[in-house]
Image (cartoon, rainbow, N blue to C red):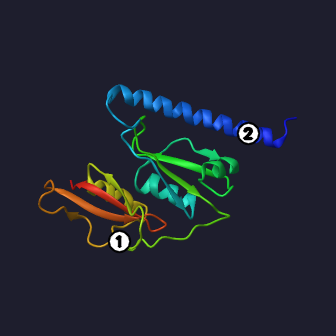
Amino acid sequence: MKNPSFVNRELICTTMIVLAVSGLAAWAANSKTVPDAEFAKSTVDFGIVVSDIDKSLNFYKNALGLKEREPFEVTPAMGADSGLSDNLAFKVYPLVLENDSTATNVKLMQFKDAPGKKVDNSFIHSSLGVSYLTIYVKDTTAALERAKAYGVKPIAKGPVALPEGFPKGIYLTLLRDPDGNLIELVGPKK
């Protein structure tokens, strides 16, 4: 029987290898299409810590239409060694708009035993840091119908037409996820 610290190191090494191979595959695929690019991908992935993973997955998958990729676990040691968490294990649920290798990942995670402080998202100027997520839609009307079916309504007067200087016929609508984070839908109404 392997001792627990060896198993933990073995798991960390396996995780690091999987992450490295995934990153190299994405880099190799992208480097062929953008040879002079400084970065391995032209997208930015980000994580959102949520208070209730089930409610948030329901919102992002059903009300907004994102697709879930394979979730993965982060061990306490990996969390601590990387600086992501204070020796806490957690599961990450990546979501994408479309299933392709260059899609931006919205990574949802929950810490039941160490809930974080809620950020004031009353307006985009209420707190420092990331304030909203923008999703470009082909049809604002259809996107809002989907959201409404899950009890999600626009805030303020949305959808509102973008002002002069922006493409005509494009609208902005703000929604809130279950934790109050702002989601911006941008696109035409049909």
Residue 149 picture quarter: bottom left
**Residue shown at the point (54%, 61%) measured from the top left:** 50
> How crowded is the residue under tag 2: few (<14 C-alpha within 10 Å), some, or many (20+)?
few
Q: Position of residue 124 (x, y in %)?
A: 35, 69
Relative depth, front residue between 47 and 34: 34
Residue 160 left/right relative to 117: left
> How crowded is the residue under tag 1: few (<14 C-alpha within 10 Å), some, or many (20+)?
few
Which secondary structure lies at badge 2?
helix
Q: Residue furthest top?
A: 32
Tag shown at residue 125: 1
**Residue shown at the point (68%, 64%) measured from the top left:** 113
Decide which of tag 1 and tag 2 comes sooner along the chain. 2
Relative depth, front residue between 138 and 184: 184
Q: Position of residue 125 (x, y in %)?
A: 35, 71
Residue 37 picture quarter: top left
Which secondary structure lies at badge 1?
loop
Vertical side of 51 occupied by 101: above or below: above
On-image quarter of the N terminus: top right
Vertical side of 20 occupied by 109: above or below: below
Q: Amino acid at mark 2?
A: Arg
Q: Amino acid at mark 1?
A: His
Vertical side of 74 occupied by 85: above or below: below
Q: Residue furthest right?
A: 1
Read off the residue under disc 2: 9
Numbered marks: total: 2
Residue 142 picture quarter: bottom left
Residue 176 left/right relative to 179: left
Relative depth, front residue between 174 and 44: 44
Q: Give the Cα distance between marks 1 and 2.
A: 43 Å
Residue 8 left/right relative to 19: right
**Residue shown at the point (26%, 71%) measured from the top left:** 157
Relative depth, front residue between 9 and 105: 9
